[in-house]
Image: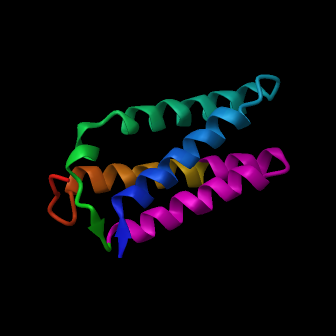
Amino acid sequence: MASRHELQGAFASLADILRDGFDPSAEQDLRERWLGMTVYHALVARRREWLSLARDCDAYAPVIAQLGAAATALQTACDLQQTLTALELGKAAIALVEGVLDTDPCGGGTD
């Protein structure tokens, strides 16, 4: 069973990597994609549905794993192609979080 706290932590870790890893001297396409993912992350982070998610839910575990994989990929990318691939993983992981917020797979909670 995974917790809402773990989900939020993994999501916040991705935000830290996006914030700290941005390279303003990178080529334009990479900067645009990086900033686009940062904006997407911020939009999902501000959703009200975070407050109503259940404390524990099995559906969070694969999302947490994907967030972790994306974070690792971004941290370890050592060339343009790896970074672009990592950004796609990150975008997909954020979409999974968005799906959890949209569907509330464990029926929510008030705690």
Q: How is the image coloured?
A: rainbow
Name which residue lies at 47% across and 63% down.
64
Residue 58 appears at what percent x and percent y? 32, 74
For residue 33, say whether it is visible. Answer: yes
Name which residue lies at 69% across and 28% down.
31
Quarter residue 59 falls in: bottom left
Name the image quarter holding the N terminus.
bottom left
Secondary structure, magenta segment, majority class: helix
Magenta span includes 86:
yes
In this picture, which residue range is highlighted in magenta?
Answer: 59-87
Given residues 89 and 71, the one toward you in this image is 71
Quarter residue 100 falls in: bottom left
In the image, residue 9 above or below residue 44: below
Q: Judge left or right: residue 74 versus residue 88.
A: right
Residue 62 appears at what percent x and percent y? 44, 70
Name which residue lies at 82% across and 23% down.
25
In this view, the residue farthest toward the front is 111
